[in-house]
Amino acid sequence: MNIDDAILNRFSCREFSSKQLTDSQITEILNVARYAPSPKNRQPWRFFIVRNAERKTFVKIFEKNGDIFCCADKLNEFNSENQTYKILNEADTIILVFNLYYSRTILGKDDPLFDVTNIQAIGAAIQNMLLKATSMGIGSLWVCDVFSHNQQLCSQYCPDGQLIAAIALGYPKKNGLKSFRKPLEDLIITKQE
């Protein structure tokens, strides 16, 4: 699949089959992340792969007395954590994405420009992974609902990192529905006279 096909065919997969991914497929997907641009070539991304036995530990972070729970008063405008939990449970592999270079740790103070440029680079690394997965016939979902469990996930998987996202991977149960995309002319800002 060429890059244009991968871009146009990528979709947010929310239903995964039970077919397992191979270790080499996960390695291929992670490897393309390394080629994303980053400020001063910092390559701030770090990944923790959750699969097989580690899944039980990961899932327990989202449970309390056997029920799914949300740590935040209001997770997001859609209250979608229950659906996200179902998706994460169904996906073959979850990749937790961390920023190891956030300003408070590296510079000893908050520096919004330093942080935003690193997070932009991590976003490019994530997009590389999503496009590679699509080109391999693997479904993916960029997940941010995990932030309600940020503290637990960081302490469990990357104590020195800042959680940026989770990526769910697996073979899709069915072809994805295309999301509505705004017309290009609605996205281009022109100078006002």
Image (cartoon, helix red, strand yellow):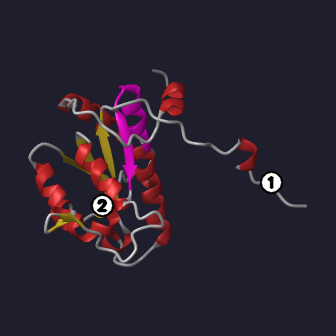
Q: Is residue 163 in sight in this rendering?
A: no
138, above or below 37, in the image: above
Residues in magenta? 127-143
Image quarter hosting the N terminus:
top left
Residue at the image point whose x is 39% and y is 69% from the top: 75
Residue 20 drawn in magenta: no
Per the rendering, the mark at residue 100 is 2
102, above or below 87, in the image: below
Mark 1 neighbour density, 10 Å: few (under 14) some (14–19) many (20 or more)? few
| Residue at the spot of label 1 | 190
Q: Residue 139 at x, y = what percent?
A: 36, 35
| In-image side of 47 versus 75 (left or right) | left
Residue 69 or 150: which is nearer the viewer? Answer: 69
Q: Looking at numbered disc 1 in the image, what kind of residue is underneath it?
A: Thr
How many numbered marks does the figure carry? 2
| In-image side of 18 versus 44 (left or right) | left
Residue at the image point whose x is 28% and y is 67% from the top: 150
